[in-house]
Image: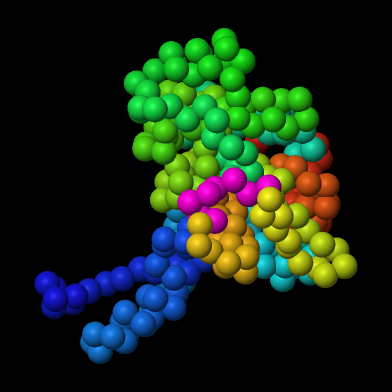
Amino acid sequence: MHSARHIVLFYDKNQTVKSSDLSHEEYEKTLYKYNYPTHYHKLEMQMRCEGGDTYLQYVKDVMACLRKEREKIENYDFFIFDDVNALVESVRRKDDEMGLCKTVAGFSWEWKTKPDNKPKDDMRYYDALVQKGEYDISIDGNHYIWNLTNDSWVTRQDSHNTIGCIHTTQGYDMNYVGVIFGKEIDYDFEKKSIVINLDEYKDSKVKASTDAKTLKRLIVNTYTTILARGIKGCYVYACNSNMKKYLKEYILPANDVTINDK
């Protein structure tokens, strides 16, 4: 603010996903602190996502539990899977076809395979883990490995086989994104609200010195953000049955269409 005459700031309070992020309250306080003339403009449209603002608002409404009925999103593939491996393999096929198609998940599993140093951009470290039977994520008998690095994961060779997280995908655009809702997020049909089980949330850095209410907001923001990473489409799977049932009210089941034809 001291080094420029005019400053343009973009801020989205729904994309704060960890406790160290600048909160909306801190953002507002900083602007008022320096007492500069401030003009607010709302970004009405984003040209990145082929589902347009209709899809982006739809996702926000679903995650805020504000939707009343399902809506078909034009020009966008938005499907929910009953089988997590069907989702993963569908995204991998898309990656083979057009590139930049990855699967990401909520932080509901320990990062046991985390390397001491950043592996080279080849498949050797990943292949060694598989040969030793070392995995991070287990869902219904299927086993997967977390991203081997947070740095430039989307463009690495091993990203085709590994599962990314919010820290590897925020700020990236992918053609298709697969989103796995972890064990930490569920839906309560009596309260008509998303609920969080912090015992199943494994991101210790985000949990540190953060109260439960703030953590719920950060986790919901995380899923809202990664659901919006796909340009052409988003595939979804939920570990918890109530969350899956809730999401199916608003997302077309994948078995109702021929995914391979999309």
- Tell me where residue 53 sits by quadrant: bottom right
| Magenta-span inclusion, residue 260 | no
224 vs 238: above or below: below
Residue at the extreme right of the image, as rendered: 190
The residue depicted at 52 percent of the width and 27 percent of the height is 113
Location of the C terminus by quadrant is: top right
Residue at the extreme top of the image, as rendered: 131
Q: Which residues are magenta?
A: 200-207
User: Where is residue 252 drawn, in percent x and y?
Assistant: 76, 48
Q: Is residue 39 shown left or right of residue 160?
A: left
Q: Nearer the viewer, residue 252 or 138?
A: 138
User: Where is residue 245 drawn, in percent x and y?
Assistant: 83, 52
Q: Is residue 58 shown left or right of residue 229?
A: right
170 vs 157: above or below: below
- Res 86 seen here: yes
Q: Nearer the viewer, residue 139 or 50?
A: 139
- In this picture the colour scheme is rainbow
| Magenta-span inclusion, residue 202 | yes
Q: Nearer the viewer, residue 75 or 2?
A: 2
Q: Main secondary structure of the magenta part?
A: helix
User: Where is residue 14 drawn, in percent x and y?
Assistant: 52, 66
123 vs 223: above or below: above
- Tell me where residue 237 sits by quadrant: top right
The residue depicted at 61 percent of the width and 15 percent of the height is 133
Location of the N terminus by quadrant is: bottom left
Q: Nearer the viewer, residue 7 or 43?
A: 7
- Res 80 seen here: no
223 vs 163: above or below: below
The residue depicted at 66 percent of the width and 55 percent of the height is 198
User: Where is residue 93 drawn, in percent x and y?
Assistant: 59, 25
